[in-house]
């Protein structure tokens, strides 16, 4: 948050509470996707700080951060708005944290893999996004081990197909 405020020359007064870290692309005017963004020169500095945070302990930020990271070489006004939204979310959800608990013997625990996918969520190319989380769980145990969020490499023909691609990626990677 501090890096963003330095880059934009603003204060925390410009940040407002938001419910999610993302803006729906349909809410942005088309010209925002064509105009070079104000932060185009320094966007990678702020985005990479967010990538680090999302990978270490905030999987709720992964989709928003990944979508911004893909845009650093072609930064637009829409990206400026997305980054501002992400920073607002991070600033007002600073007390959110991942909690784990272990209360079982290892014999009573199992690995669980949760996989999900969006369907054609990226307006630019209609590609879906895969997400997965691997956890160790038992009756009194829940420990996330790893997670990922990744844009799929091909366009899916259905939501079922994008879900299967996500499951395949989760099984291979995790």
Image (tube, rainbow, N blue to C red):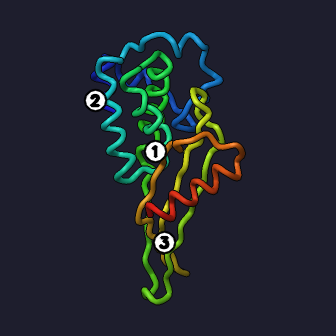
- SS category of the residue bearing label 2: helix
Q: Earlier in the sequence, mark 3 or mark 2?
A: 2
The answer to whether mark 3 and mark 1 are in CB contact below 8 A is no
Q: Nearer the viewer, residue 69 or 171?
A: 171
Rendered location of residue 105, percent (x, y): 43, 88
Whole-number angstrom distance, CA of label 3 to CA of label 2: 34 Å
Q: Look at 57% across and 41% down and name the residue there.
A: 154
Figure quadrant of the C terminus: bottom left
Q: In the displayed structure, does residue 19 sit left or right of residue 89?
A: right
Query: Image quadrant of residue 41?
Result: top left
Q: Examine the rendered structure and indicate whether residue 126 appears above or below residue 26.
A: below
Q: Which residue is mark 2?
A: 45
Q: Which residue is mark 3?
A: 142
Q: Earlier in the sequence, mark 3 or mark 1?
A: 1
Rendered location of residue 51, percent (x, y): 36, 41
Query: Image quadrant of residue 69?
Result: top left
- SS category of the residue bearing label 1: helix
Q: Examine the rendered structure and indicate whether residue 14 appears above or below residue 62.
A: above
Whole-number angstrom distance, CA of label 1 to CA of label 2: 17 Å
Q: Which residue is mark 1?
A: 62
Give residue 41's mark.
none
Instruction: Determine crowd level at label 1: few under 14, some 14-19, many 20+ residues with C-alpha closer than 10 A.
Output: many
């Amino acid at each position: 948050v501090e890096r963003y405020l330095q880059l934009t020359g603003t204060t925390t007064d410009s940040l407002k509470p938001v419910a999610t870290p993302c803006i729906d692309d349909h809410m942005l005017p088309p010209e925002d996707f064509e105009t070079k963004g104000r932060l185009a020169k320094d966007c990678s500095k702020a985005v990479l700080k967010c990538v680090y945070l999302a990978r270490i302990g905030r999987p709720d930020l992964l989709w928003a951060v990944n979508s911004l990271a893909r845009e650093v070489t072609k930064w637009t006004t829409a990206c400026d708005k997305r980054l501002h939204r992400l920073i607002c979310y991070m600033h007002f959800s600073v007390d959110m944290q991942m909690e784990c608990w272990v209360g079982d013997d290892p014999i009573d625990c199992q690995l669980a893999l949760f996989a999900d996918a969006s369907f054609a969520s990226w307006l630019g190319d209609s590609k879906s996004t895969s997400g997965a989380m691997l956890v160790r769980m038992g009756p009194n145990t829940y420990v996330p081990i790893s997670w990922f969020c990744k844009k799929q490499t091909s366009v899916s023909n259905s939501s079922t197909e994008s879900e299967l691609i996500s499951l395949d990626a989760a099984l291979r990677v995790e």
